[in-house]
Amino acid sequence: MFIRSDQAGPIYQQLYRRMREAILRGELQPGARLPATRTLAEDAGVSRNTILLVYDQLRAEGYVEGHVGAGTFVARELPDDVLRPAPRTARVDEAAPPPLGISAYANRARIILSPVAAPSAANLRYDFRYGLPGVAEFPRDIWRRLLARQAKRFSSETSRYADPAGLPRLRQVIAEYLRRARAVDCDESRVIVVNGSQQALDLIARTLIDPGNRVLVEDPHYLGAREVFQAAGARLVPCPIDDDGLDIERAPKAAGQARLAYVTPSHQFPTGAVMPLARRLALLAWARKSGAYVIEDDYDSEFRYGGRPVEAVQALDTTGQVIYVGTMSKTLFPALRIGFLVLPSPLVKPVLAIKHLSDRHTATLQQSILADFIGEGYFERHVRRARTQNARRRAALLDALARIFGDKVVVQGSNAGLHLVAWFRDRPAVDTARIVDAAAAGGIGVYPINPYYLSEPPSAGLLLGYAAMSEREIDAGIRLLGRVLG
């Protein structure tokens, strides 16, 4: 037991005060056995008689009690329990900065980070949570077999620290897939494996943003991107979107000084708009003129249900100004925590340096399994199957919304992705919270669009995910929502 003296008065009084404080603060719990006097004397560097004086004083005041042959124990009922100081583990004001101070970056992150409130899944019969892929069609047996294979290959070589860029085999198959599926111009030397797209955005922000730099963002936009940029000290320049996504011609004048533009062109988050070719080319022309980088977040482009697929913005880039971000969270499962970056060549070394400092490297076992999963054709087979299943779920949701709400609800962004937006055009944006609360009280999880806007939404709007639900659940959930909302 370590006892710190307070250098005030005789040593036995100092030790007495410290032990009394430890008892009152709960560091020594009621009923706890105290060290033997000889042991404590040796630990404290004092005579045994000094410790006997301390124990006698504590016993006389009722803080400890002795049992013959058993030792000395903290009393189970303390004499001045009402005056007991608050334990050190007492809850403090988490909004207040630590007394010794934190960095400007940490303070910005502390203030900015505000997760979107969500109803408890345990209380929901039907949960239209967006961003979750379906699990029913995931090939568990194949994944389990690949995991077992990699476990058998485990050796001193595969258990060592790895390249922060990712395993070469995984980077190679990702590059091959992106060239084939998205026409992305890349090779494995420019592919960086990261712990999800959120880390990708953080690495980009740390590489390119200094406090005060401007970043052009869609309005509305992905909240995780906004928080990363603001934590880095960026000044956001919001640009309104329409049914064709971001229109750079409508960007505010301040966009001319932007260091970055963040866009989700293949399935705008959260509205689902798809940016046509003309606007993609205009965005690239703006980037060349402004000397800015474009972050293309291609988070769920695999799931498209109508119209001809549009190639990635990165595929149209001829000057090396597009940073491509992808993730496995929507196509496989979020807990995998694997995403990837395709970087312009000049950014590879600085991003790798920052990633090395951040986490050294992404977990190699998961990378090895994923490399086999993609390289042996299972990934694209799974995507095709999931796309078919999600198309059916999407159709069930569209049918239920039309049947239950009719022209009171306008649907946006239903041609791609894993969610859509339902606009209640006869209700103002301020009603969204009441709709969400009423639905949650009825056992239905629906999610507001308001947090993703810097401006005011045009009306009450809900994000409705469908990939993690069955068609029967979708239909029943919307029927119940209709009854709850009257």
Image: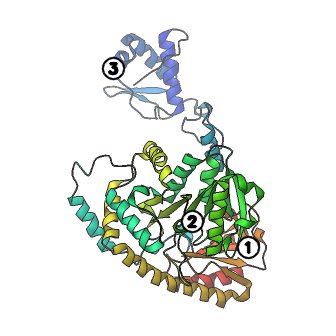
Neighbor class of circle 1 (other Cα within 10 Å; few <14, some 14-19, many 20+) is: many
Identify the secondary structure beneath mark 3.
helix
Neighbor class of circle 3 (other Cα within 10 Å; few <14, some 14-19, many 20+) is: few
Residue 456 image position (x, y, % from top left): 77, 65
Q: Can residue 127 be spotted in the picture?
A: no
User: Where does the N terminus fall, quadrant-wise?
Assistant: top left
Judge depth for marks 3 and 2 and give the one in front. Answer: 2
Judge depth for marks 1 and 3 and give the one in front. Answer: 1
Q: Nearer the viewer, residue 123 or 240?
A: 240
What is the total number of numbered labels drawn onto the structure image? 3
Residue 25 image position (x, y, % from top left): 53, 32
User: Where does the C terminus fall, quadrant-wise?
Assistant: bottom right
Q: Can residue 150 be spotted in the picture?
A: yes
Return the residue at label 3.
39
Marks 3 and 2, how far apart in space?
Answer: 52 Å
Q: Nearer the viewer, residue 232 or 257?
A: 257
Tag 3–tag 2 contact (CB < 8 Å): no
* Residue positioned 58% across, 72% down in the render: 267
Amino acid tagged 3: Thr
Q: Is residue 141 left or right of residue 216?
A: left
Identify the secondary structure beneath mark 2.
loop
- Quadrant of the image occupied by residue 427: bottom right
Residue sitting farthest toward the bottom:
403
Neighbor class of circle 2 (other Cα within 10 Å; few <14, some 14-19, many 20+) is: few
Q: Tell me which label, 1 or 3, sits earlier in the chain.
A: 3
State the mark number for residue 120. 2
Q: Is residue 446 left or right of residue 374?
A: right
Q: Is residue 13 left or right of residue 457?
A: left
Amino acid tagged 2: Ser
Return the residue at label 1.
460
Q: Tell me which label, 1 or 2, sits earlier in the chain.
A: 2
- Quadrant of the image occupied by residue 372: bottom left
